Image (cartoon, helix red, strand yellow):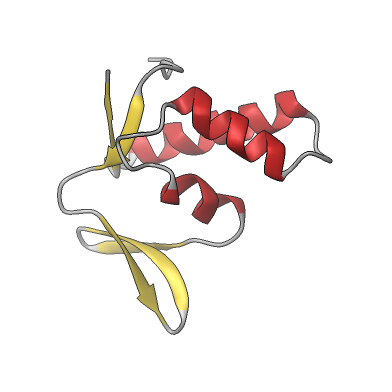
Amino acid sequence: MAIDPNSKPQLAPGVRLGENNNQRVLLMPERALRLIGPSLEIVQRCDGKHTVAQIVADLQKIYSKAEPHKVETDILGYLQLLRDERALDFTA
């Protein structure tokens, strides 16, 4: 199912941002995902307040040297990966 640009992603219950050996990680039940660069920028905005479209627009500004469509595609792919891993919930 495609991600609605107006939906607001947030960390799923039991998932949180943490730190391990001075690196930011996404802590999920029974696993952790190291976050660096764009992945950290994306997850920090998954607070249930920012829409997917706002996250894309913010990161297109930060990574302005990259092609905007490529930035959007990468973000949507990463959000889908996190949804598939049950790390994110999306609200209307």
Q: In which quarter of the image is residue 31?
A: bottom left
Residue at horizontal 40%, vertical 17%? 6
Q: Is residue 89 left or right of residue 41?
A: left
Residue at horizontal 34%, vertical 64%? 32
Query: x and y percent of residue 2 in the render?
Result: 43, 15
Quadrant holding the C terminus:
top left
Quadrant holding the N terminus:
top left
Query: x and y percent of residue 56 in the render?
Result: 57, 30
Position of 76 relative to 12 (above/below): above
| View extreme (left): residue | 13
Q: Which of 78 and 49 is in front in this view?
A: 49
Query: x and y percent of residue 30 in the render?
Result: 22, 62
Q: Is residue 84 left or right of residue 77?
A: left
Position of 49 relative to 13 (above/below): above
The mark total stands at: 0
Residue at horizontal 51%, vertical 38%? 78
Position of 72 relative to 30 (above/below): above
